[in-house]
Image (tube, helix red, strand yellow):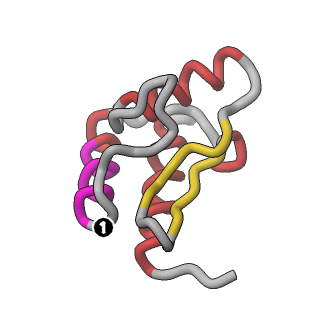
Amino acid sequence: MKFTMYEFALMTRFAELAKRYGLEPWQFGIEYDQSTGETYVTGTPVGAEANGRFRQMIGALGISDDTRTFPQEEGREMLEALDEAIKSVPRKWVR
């Protein structure tokens, strides 16, 4: 499977955002559809605590419980929304 630079940048930002919410990338599913340009949720974490953090994370991007598709347009708008969400979540330092 080949990834475009946009897909790589998109998923890297999702991984960073998830990390800030205490999640690992394999705990949830987010996919980008090249044919439509949509980014959507394909799966949620198991467990109440992780699921709650995931819902907070996608809520920061404008997704509600009943919506599966991110409202941002493909490209700059989506990447800027992710960058803003990353900036708004305080980083938890581990020693």
Nearer to me, 28 or 18: 28
Location of residue 88 by image quarter = top left
Nearer to me, 83 or 77: 77
In percent of width and height, residue 56 lies at: 45, 25
- Residue at the image position 33 percent from the left and 34 percent from the top: 62
Mark 1 is on which residue type? Gly
- Residue at the image position 66 percent from the left and 34 percent from the top: 44
- Residue at the image position 70 percent from the left and 40 percent from the top: 27
Q: Which residue is mark 1?
A: 75
Residue 79 is a magenta residue: yes
Q: Residue furthest front?
A: 36
In percent of width and height, residue 45 lies at: 69, 32
The dominant secondary structure in magenta is helix
- Residue at the image position 58 percent from the left and 50 percent from the top: 30
Mark 1 neighbour density, 10 Å: few (under 14) some (14–19) many (20 or more): few
Q: Is residue 57 visible?
A: yes
Residue 37 is a magenta residue: no
Left or right of 13, for residue 71: left
62 to 35, vertically: above or below: above
Magenta residues, start to end: 76-84
63 to 16, vertically: above or below: above
**Disc 1 element:** loop
31 to 17, vertically: above or below: below
Nearer to me, 61 or 36: 36
